[in-house]
Image: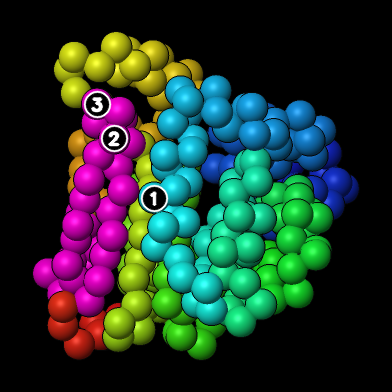
Amino acid sequence: MTKNHPKLPENPYYEGVPDYMTEVYDWAYVNPRRVNQLDHNLVVKVLLFGNDQRLMRAYLNEIQPGMKVWQVAHVYGDLVRKVAQKVGPDGSFHLTDITPAQIEHGQAKLAIYPWSKVVRADAANYQCDKSFDLICSFFLLHEVPDDKKHEIVNHMLSQMPEGGKVLFVDYHRPSLWQPIRWILKWVNAKLEPFAEALWQNEISHYAKHADQYNWQKRTLFGGVYQIVAVTRTAPAAQN
């Protein structure tokens, strides 16, 4: 179910945006004025405690020129440009997002890369031809409710062809000795109500047929972040 933002019923930036986005993340991802203020590399570096380049490299290192890549949501900074550049004109890059403000920013960043396509779509049901070599969720899962986590993870896996890969880069449960743990505890309580589920559950928990896939996880920065690469170990699951 979707609704318009209660304070701006005629504003196109809120049309068709899910309730949880307008109610929880208006300040970060929906309101175009806030998006303009936040969409900068320095903001990304601060939010990721200086780990932005390491985390982006984990994604970019999975890409070879000529690959077909789908990123399921726009992210701030220049990551999507780097992905498009790495894919190159012999490949293709699809970027999806559910919010109009994010689509505008994605289109502006990728306008000079004709092999890129920006589509307004829900990561849980974007229909494609199932030929992507790599499908990546870069810091999306911690921002959606648990039922949406299930939908997104299962849809991403269903779109992975034989020989393809799904990549999740997101938050994780920090080690007890990691002081950032307590900062994130506060942030989660105040601003990120869906994030701590990733402290309690492995991403594979959200997959309906997890045993049909190979899950390879590594963590960074004292467990604050996780990078999970998923490949198929069995015939495609029936949804």
Give residue 109's quadrant in the image. Answer: bottom right
Give the residue pinned by disc 3. 222
Evaluate whether residue 128 shows in this view.
Answer: yes
Rendered-image quadrant of the N terminus: bottom right
Query: Mark 1 is on which residue type?
Result: Ala
Evaluate whether residue 145 shows in this view.
Answer: no
- Residues 106 and 91: in front is 91
Q: Secondary structure at mark 2?
A: strand
Q: Secondary structure at mark 3?
A: loop
Q: How is the image coloured?
A: rainbow
Between the C-alphas of marks 1 and 2, the distance is: 11 Å
Q: Position of residue 214 (x, y in %)?
A: 17, 67
Q: Secondary structure at mark 1?
A: helix
Between the C-alphas of marks 3 and 2, the distance is: 6 Å
**Pointer 1 with pointer 2, Cβ within 8 A:** yes
Question: What mark, if any, has residue 220 been given in the picture?
Answer: 2
Give the residue pinned by disc 1. 58
- Residues 169 and 56: in front is 56
